Image: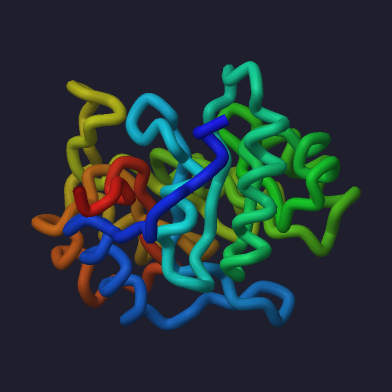
Amino acid sequence: MTLFKRNRKPLLGPDGQALAAFAATLRPAFVRGQALPRLLYLTDRRRIPDVVAAAERLPRGSGVILRDYGYAKRAALATALHAVCRKRELVFLVGGDPRLARQVNADGVHFPEAMVDRLKLFRREAPSLILTAAAHDAKALDRAADAGADAALLSPVFPTASHPGAPALGLSAFRELVDQSPLPVYGLGGLTVDTVAQLEGLPLAGVAAIGAFADAS
């Protein structure tokens, strides 16, 4: 069960440190009197196999979104992540599965763009939970806002290893979308020690990443 355990003190690598430092400069966005986390880690066991250890590396007050949608032991992983998040004072969201989120008492649910209609229904059932949505353009941002999302993860800002070859928004288009967004926005995609500073001055709720939270080794 090494997936769920950690035997040495975890440390963020350069990308994670840069994102954490940038996130700390942002003004928090609030929903229902609660501050949204300014730094989000999205799990992907193909990129970082030990996702629990990655969560342990995050600064307190950050957030974790469990992706790994096809993982056979996803429920067990959700339970392990929830425990780490409670210990580390992290916000924990389950991706795309409201039932599992309730099962593990998560803080909320993250909905892929194709599931935004389910977000609208779930908002009525769980008015106090944090609900976020993925978005890739202005129309998706509007749909997420209409559905009752608290924030959107807008991607990809820059070319990303998660979707090699996929077109990125680029800084100019991303900036325009953020400025016009009807709800708080997180930047996601290609954010590293070399790129995150380009987002300085944007009214972001936070930044999100996958591979940036590998350890310093």
Would you say 128 lies left or right of 201 here?
Answer: right
- 147 shown above or below 71: below
Coloring scheme of the render? rainbow
Residue 6 lies, in percent from the top left, at 47, 48
Side (left or right) of 78 relative to 66: right
The image shows residue 105, relative to residue 135, as above or below, that is: below
On-image quarter of the N terminus: top right
Q: Farthest front residue?
A: 7
Q: Residue furthest right?
A: 125
- Left-right relation of 111 to 98: left
What is the x, y in percent for residue 119?
72, 42
The one nearer the camera, 11 or 140, is 11
Q: Quadrant of residue 10?
A: bottom left
Q: Quadrant of residue 197?
A: bottom left
**Foreground pick, 112 / 79:** 79
Q: Residue at x 64, y 17 (%)?
A: 72
- Up/down of 74 relative to 24, above or below: above
* Quadrant of the image occupied by residue 114: top right
Q: Position of residue 37 (x, y in %)?
A: 52, 68
Q: Count the marks: how many?
A: 0
What residue appears at the point 14 percent right and 58 percent down from the top-left corner?
193
Residue visible at 48% across and 53% down in the picture: 55
Would you place residue 166 above or below residue 63 in this image? above
Q: Position of residue 8 (x, y in %)?
A: 39, 54
Q: Residue at x 54, y 62 (%)?
A: 183
Image check: 159 left or right of 62? Answer: left
